[in-house]
Image: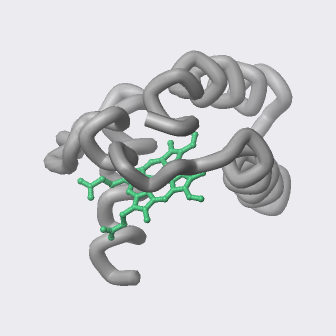
Amino acid sequence: MEHAKRMAREFFCAGSGGPEPYTGKDMLAAHKGMNISEQEYLAVMDDIVGAMSKHKLDEGTKNDVIAILYSLKGNIIRV
Ligand code: HEM
């Protein structure tokens, strides 16, 4: 869990301009062989959107993050 939390934090920090770098695997390498379904992917998206709402991120930022996450879909589902 510690590793997962650290990677998630780095991933979002680096993706939103840093300065913290992301030191983990790329999304394809990280999820390869997990046989992740569309529903599982959507459940993670829901959790991320929920976390952003809980922390009162503005709509523009939330939409940007959703668009970026959506663009990664092909590297995560059933790879
Ligand atoms: C947009 C959606 C997602 C994003 C942005 C994301 C992001 C990440 C990142 C940054 C890592 C760390 C890679 C590393 O350890 O170097 C990771 C690992 C992982 N992801 Fe995802 N992920 C997504 C969806 C999912 C889904 C849908 C599942 C399963 C239902 C999943 C399961 C895992 C697991 C099991 C790991 C390894 C955790 C560990 O070794 O500590 N991910 N993901």
Between residues 19 and 32, which one lies in front from this camera angle?
32
Q: Position of residue 53 (x, y in %)?
A: 83, 52
Q: Position of residue 51 (x, y in %)?
A: 73, 59
In the displayed structure, does residue 26 sit left or right of residue 16? left
Above or below for 58 versus 39: above
Picture quadrant of ligand 1: bottom left
Can you see residue 54? yes
Can you see residue 52? no
Q: Position of residue 8 (x, y in %)?
A: 42, 56
Q: Looking at the image, which residue is at 53% across and 22% down?
A: 74
Q: Position of residue 57 (x, y in %)?
A: 75, 43
Q: Looking at the image, which residue is at 39% across and 30% down?
A: 15
Residue reaching furthest to the bottom: 1
Which image quadrant for residue 73? top right
Q: What colour scheme has been applied to the protein in the rendered image?
A: one colour
Quarter of the image containing the C terminus? Answer: top left
Above or below for 35 versus 74: below
Between residues 13 and 73, which one lies in front from this camera angle?
73
Count of labels in the image: 0
Which image quadrant for residue 71? top right
Above or below for 76 versus 6: above
Quarter of the image containing the N terminus? Answer: bottom left
In the displayed structure, does residue 30 sit left or right of residue 67? left
Q: Looking at the image, which residue is at 75% across and 58% down?
A: 47
In the displayed structure, does residue 15 sit left or right of residue 19? right
Q: Looking at the image, which residue is at 67% across and 18% down?
A: 67
Between residues 67 and 21, which one lies in front from this camera angle?
67
In the displayed structure, does residue 18 sit left or right of residue 61? left
